[in-house]
Amino acid sequence: MITIFEVPGKRKSGQGTLAQSVNASGVIAGYYVDAASLFHGFVRSSNGTITTFEAPGAGRGALQGTAAYGINAEGNIAGGYTDASTVFHGFLRTP
């Protein structure tokens, strides 16, 4: 079975929702790229509720922002963000 989902919002070509990791409970972590080419993290619960988030210090310009890459059984999310100076950083988001 394939379940299609999108983080709500208007997109243009080359942008949209990217699921990166799923845990055994069916919770998905990933990121999406908005119409301004800004990256945002998201977590999708097993019931389909999507919560978006930004890492503290994440830049707000094009090709900056937050990306979630992995989620473990406890719901901890690992990822990275790019700040306003285009420097990359890692983060851990706890539930």
Image (spheres, rainbow, N blue to C red):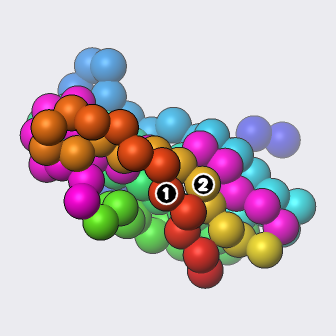
As displayed, is residue 62 above or below residue 80? above
Q: Residue at x 42, y 54 (%)?
A: 41
Q: Out of 38 and 57, give the one closest to the viewer.
A: 57
Q: Secondary structure at mark 2?
A: strand
Residue under numbered circle 1 = 91
Q: Is residue 14 visible?
A: yes
Residue 3 location in percent, x, y? Answer: 69, 46
Displayed quadrant of residue 46: bottom right
Crowd class of label 1 (few under 14; some 14 to 19; many from 20; radius 10 Å) = some
Q: Nearer the viewer, residue 13 or 21?
A: 21
Residue sitting at 88 percent across and 61 percent down? 24
In the rendered image, the vertical position of residue 65 relative to residue 71, given as above or below: above
Between 51 and 74, the residue placed more toward the observer is 74
Task: Using the image, determine if residue 46 lies above or below residue 22.
Answer: below
Name the kind of residue labelled 2 in the image.
Ala
Which residue sits furthest right?
A: 24
Q: Is residue 80 above or below residue 48?
A: above
Residue 76, given in percent of the width and then of the height, sits at 67, 68
Q: Which residues are magenta?
A: 57-73
Question: In the drawing, does residue 32 fall left or right of residue 21?
Answer: left
Q: Split into 4 quadrants, where in the image is the N terminus?
A: top right
